[in-house]
Image (spheres, helix red, strand yellow):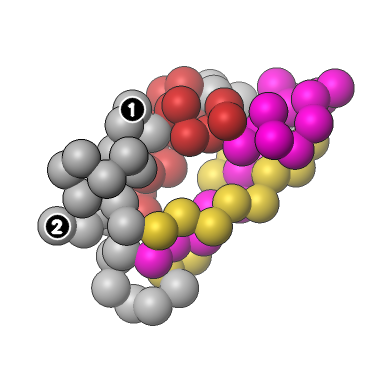
Amino acid sequence: MSMLGKDIADLIVKSIPDAKVEMIDLAGDNNHWKAIVISKSFQGLNRVRQHQMVYQALEGKMDGSDGELHALALETRVD
């Protein structure tokens, strides 16, 4: 099963309301995504913590238990 970029972006914005999210389908298969996430919420946080915030927003879709999201490359920036 795959996930649409819009669905991934919606989950991120639900958890990080001020986030601006750009989704890039790296393989054209809805399974290999790159998310560029820009948020003021990342201010003062190191890159690891920023990425943890995004992964938490995905509500377990990335943990492999249901296979909804196979791969996600992340780029985070402070707005």
Amino acid type at circle 1 is Glu
Side of 63 relative to 44 (left or right): left
Neighbour class for label 2 at 10 Å: few (<14), some, many (≥20)? few
Amino acid type at circle 2 is Met
Side of 68 relative to 76 (left or right): left
Q: Is residue 37 above or below residue 52?
A: below
In this figure, which residue is indicated by the disc labeled 1? 59
In this figure, which residue is indicated by the disc labeled 2? 1
Query: Residue 78: which numbered mark, if any?
Result: none
Quick check: is 19 in the magenta stretch?
no
How much space separates mark 2 and mark 1, taking CA atoms? 16 Å
Q: Is residue 37 above or below residue 57?
A: below
x then y, percent, for residue 1? 14, 57
Of the numbered discs 2 and 1, the one sitting upstream in the chain is 2
x then y, percent, for residue 48? 69, 35
Q: Is residue 43 above or below residue 68?
A: above
Question: On the image, which quarter does residue 58 sit in?
Answer: top left
Magenta residues, as a range? 32-51
